[in-house]
Image (cartoon, helix red, strand yellow):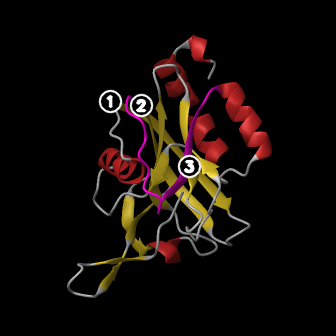
Amino acid sequence: MPITPATATNSPSSGTAEPILLELVDEDGETIGTAEKLAAHQPPGRLHRAFSVFLFDERGRLLLQQRALGKYHSPGVWSNTCCGHPYPGEAPFAAAARRTFEELGVSPSLLAEAGTVRYNHPDPESGLVEQEYNHLFVGMVQSPPQPDPDEVASTAFVTPAELADRHAEAPFSAWFMTVLDAARPAVRELTGPSAGW
């Protein structure tokens, strides 16, 4: 999952920074504590809550994002519409809607739960580890993305065939195929058989 800088400014006037915390979970997805974001991704990684969003247009094309080049984890790679981590105590659905707007400037016209997937993906480039209990969401988007350039370098709407071509030629996030495959039943229900997902 994408990770943003490990600290966030508490307020512009205070000049202090507070660590960004992730929610640690057990194998059943039950909360067991918190950990600072970067520390949770250091090898071997600590299992934490995450989310992944897959938004589609009216033609059944998936909205991809290319992660900004300035990110310290998986910069410049393509991935699903949006992914990230809820704040401790924040509902995954609320976090998914919040981050989709923050990163892409769009609010889904429909957003539905699509199950969960647990995985362990080391990232060979950064040396960080994604040990995640990931909540999946699928939905529709009806307005053009207006991405935050600090988060997103580029976006593209793709058909399944276009995704296959792009995936063969361009780097994608280590977790992308895992989360897409886990979300496929809900994606097919949302987009219908003609979309080809």
**Gap in Å between the C-alphas at discs 3 and 2?**
20 Å
Percent of width and height locating residue 1:
54, 57
Q: Mark 3 belongs to which amino acid?
A: Ser
- Indicate the secondary structure of the residue bearing disc 3: strand
Based on the picture, tell me whether residue 145 belongs to the magenta stretch: yes
Magenta range is: 141-159
Tell me if 152 is positioned left or right of 94 in this view: right
Check the image and name the residue furthest to the top: 194
Crowding at mark 1 (Cα within 10 Å: few <14, some 14-19, many 20+): few
In the rendered structure, which disc, 3 or 2, sits on the residue that comes first in sequence? 2
Based on the picture, tell me whether residue 37 belongs to the magenta stretch: no
Residue 139's label in the rendered image is 2
Which image quarter is the C terminus in? Answer: top right
Instruction: Identify the residue position indicated by label 1 in the image.
Output: 109
- Indicate the secondary structure of the residue bearing disc 1: loop
Tell me if 107 is positioned left or right of 184 in this view: left
Instruction: Identify the residue position indicated by label 3 in the image.
Output: 154
